[in-house]
Image: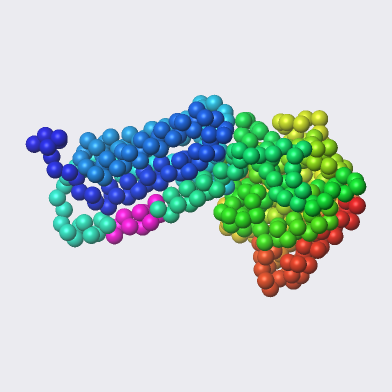
Amino acid sequence: MTEQTAPPLRRGPLLVTSALAALGGAAIPAAALVGLWRIWQLYAMLFGLLAVVEIGTVIILLGWPTRRTVRFGALAPAATLVVWLCARVFGVMRAPDPWQSANTVLGFTDYLDAGLQLIALAGLLTVAARGRRRSSRARQVAAWIALFPVSVLVIAVSAAGVTTAADGFAGTGLPSDAVTPASLPLAQRSTVEYCRPNGIPLAMDVYLPPASGSRPAPVALYVHGGGLILGDRKPGGPGATLANSSGALFTPLQRELNARGFVVASIDYRLAPATAWPAQLTDTKCAVRFLRAHAGELAIDPARIAAWGSSAGGTLVSLLGTAGGFDVGQYPGQSSAVNAVVDMFGPADLTDLTGLDATLRTAVRIALGNSPANRRAASPVTYLGPGAPPFLILQGEDTVARQSAAFAARLRAAGVPVSYVPVRGTGHTLDTPTQSPPPGELVTTVADFLTRTLP
């Protein structure tokens, strides 16, 4: 009997799991196509073609699963894996990074996609090699039970990848009605592109106060947390959930600062491990330079720029206040120095992971690797000196508390004005209802500090 006339293969658990992995692997880049199209249409067409081919081959092999169709179906995940290896491992694909639009919220979404493609490829090749083998009912049931956890994992990874890739639409490519700094409406949130490192547009949300004052406004720049590998600039959605870094404080503080005449800005920055350190810091510094370069259009005072951030965002804004250098890219004639820093539970010494919880240690290892030089460069304590601006440090009762208290003490010893506010009843966040002082008082504390520091 020839292969053409052979009966189809069973749609067993391995074939079904492989097909699910292939569908998830195709859906992730497809979800990011809108953002990728705004970066480079050629890459968008390539990824769109790969997704269509892979979805089509899955339909074919599930409809008529012969050894030939299964082998043919294995070509689609193999092709996507080759593209991923060319971009991520061998670096032979021309900038901008074609996976950036998928990695805006989760810095390793492309790694999830590569894992799904690898599962699909290995499973389909195994099915094709085994062919149609007879097996007892008991063995078939055992196979379904054994592969059920893998299928659940594949579905979960696919859902996470698609959700985060789709949420990055407005992060990697600006909306079609994006505005310029000179045309931003008052009392509204507007999105602008603040920098384009290696061809990748980075988004900034700008919240203008309800009325322009008689003098240029001060600015408060927010930098989100997420261990340098998660999160985005938006106050809600998957990015805010993944960052888990006092998102509940952002909106009331933004409104309070707007009411006091501040311009508030919130930024995306490139995430690790897709983009290596120090891109996260150079992006943040570029945002400060952007604000100064467009001070006239935004009606802001370039001498009154503050930065506040939570968790890893707290580390980045502390680096804005302490670390010189790292100024690469656009607006080279502008300073990236800030005039005040609000650090919300940001780790200050990444060379010492002793006592930090497992989640923070894992995030540091993913973002910075095992390089002592990277960890030292990413630690605000490395750059302590008398020229730093005033600091407000808010810290809960978590594993970072020891570092924050020591950082505050060392800043004072260096002659830097520091206010240290311990928050009781909460951990690595400031959103717990039982905390003391409560969130409302913390909003007032931060707003009062910035108003006093940037009069």
Residue 379 part of the magenta segment: no
Q: Report x, y in % for residue 352.
A: 68, 52
Q: How many numbered marks does the figure carry?
A: 0
Residue 433 appears in the rendering: yes
Residue at screen point 91% across, 52% down: 455
Colour scheme shown: rainbow
- Horizontal placement of 361 versus 452: left or right? left
Magenta residues, start to end: 145-154
- In the current view of this chain or complex, which residue is farthest to the left? 1
Residue at screen point 38% across, 33% down: 79
Q: Report x, y in % for residue 83.
A: 44, 32
Residue at screen point 35% across, 54% down: 151
Foreground of the two, 418 or 376? 418
- Horizontal placement of 107 versus 294: left or right? left
Q: Which image quadrant for residue 216?
A: top right
Q: Give above or below for 152 relative to 110.
A: below
Residue 152 part of the magenta segment: yes
Q: Give above or below for 237 relative to 27.
A: below
Residue 316 appears in the rendering: no
Q: Which image quadrant for residue 35?
A: top right
Residue at screen point 57% across, 34% down: 38
Predominant SS along the magenta part: helix
- In the current view of this chain or complex, which residue is farthest to the bottom? 434
- Horizontal placement of 359 versus 293: left or right? left
Foreground of the two, 346 or 78? 78
Looking at the figure, which quarter contains the N terminus? top left
Q: Report x, y in % for residue 55.
A: 35, 41
Foreground of the two, 323 or 175? 175
Q: Report x, y in % for residue 231.
A: 61, 50
